[in-house]
Structure formats: C-alpha cells, structure tokens
Amino acid sequence: MSLRSICVFCGASPGAHPIYRESAEALGRHLAERGIRLVYGGGAVGLMGVVADAAMAAGGEVIGIIPQSLERAEVGHKGLTRLEVVDGMHARKARMAELSDAFIALPGGLGTLEELFEVWTWGQLGYHAKPLGLLEVNGFYAKLSAFLDHLVEERFVRSHHREMLQIGESPAQLLELLGAWQPLVAPKWVDRQPS
C-alpha cells in the first residue's frame, strides 16, 4: 500500500515523560524523511506541536486541520505548510480522513482516543479501507491493547477487526506494518441472528 499522507492523532499535552516528546519528534522526522505528508489537528501545543515542528524542521509537508472554536485553545500552528480552519470537530475529522492514506495514534487523551476509535469504526463498517496503528511508547497503550483483546474474548469485536489496529514500537516498524496491511471485508456483527 502506498502511503503518501498520514494522519497523526496525539495529545495537546506533552504528557508526563520526556519519551513521549522524543517519540513525537522521531515520528515527525521519520515521516518527512520518507517524503510522507503529515496531516494532524493543527495545534502548536503538546505533542501536536512537537510532531508538526519535527516534520517541518526535517523539510516535510504538514497540513493542520483545526476547528475555529479550538484555534485559540490549541493555539493554531502558524508555521505549517498549510493550516485549514474548519467549522467543528466533525468537519475536522472528515477532512483529516479525506487527506490521509493511513492513521497513527501517538500517546494522547480523550480526543486522541475518540479520533482513533471513530476512524477505526469507519474502517470496520467499510467506509474506508485505510490502515491504522498505534505507536507504542513506554507501554502507554498496553492496557488498552489488553482491553481490546478482552472485547474479542467477550464476542463484542471480531478478531479480524481487532487486527485492523497495527502496533509498532518505532516509526519505521509501524510504517512497515501499515504499508503491508491488506483490508479484509467482513460483517461487523459477531453473532448476528438471521431475520
């Protein structure tokens, strides 16, 4: 799969440990070095600003998409290739998805998880056939991964839908997994009863 543009979801906070910042810098730099455009939420603060600054410093193309209502709170980044200001969160997510060939989540909070799960659900329902992944940093997503496995065990999620989410411990490893991913079309329902 050709990855020309990747959407990165991440926190508007830098997090508790320097390794989160280091990983965001490494991802932004790696995307730029591979000639992959970064699409993200448009903020200049937290890991959002870090990943964008790193990609720009490495000569990459960066497009930020930010809702007008959050432009001040997340400090809309003025040093990008392009910053698009949209009407709201739904427009932001739709535009980021439209511009991207794949999705990566760095560590983040509720917004990061919400964006990841929405785009994952879109894939599960067949609205897109784009890969998505987590950049595992310092065990940040380990408990989430265990819970996702629990959802499969309890028959609320199909195993192949669980496997849609690739997990890598370095930008290079994750991009390799995303590039090799093949979509599998299957019903969402685990135990749908005939009508």
Image (cartoon, rainbow, N blue to C red):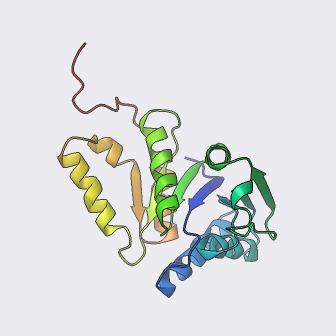
Where does the image place residue 140, in percent across and percent down from the top left?
38, 72
Location of residue 177 with respect to 18 vertically, above or below: above
Q: Answer with the quarter of the image where residue 195 lies.
A: top left
Where does the image place residue 151, in percent across and percent down from the top left?
25, 49
How many labels sit on residues? 0
Q: Answer with the quarter of the image where residue 42 lies.
A: bottom right
Left or right position of 143 against 32 = left
Most foreground residue, 194 or 177: 194
Left or right position of 126 against 43 = left
Location of residue 179 with respect to 34 vertically, above or below: above
User: Seen from this angle, which residue lies furthest top?
Assistant: 195
Left or right position of 126 against 101 = left
Where does the image place residue 179, in percent across and percent down from the top left?
51, 53
Location of residue 29 with respect to 65 vertically, above or below: below
Question: Which residue is pictured at 47% across the width and 72% down the height?
Answer: 170
Location of residue 50 with respect to 7 vertically, above or below: below
User: Seen from this angle, which residue lies furthest left?
Assistant: 153
Q: Is residue 183 visible?
A: no
Question: Which residue is pictured at 25% across the width and 54% down the height?
Answer: 149
Where does the image place residue 37, in percent across and percent down from the top left?
69, 59
Left or right position of 88 against 104 = right
Q: Is residue 49 visible?
A: yes
Most foreground residue, 173 or 158: 158
Question: Which residue is pictured at 44% across the width and 62% down the height?
Answer: 134
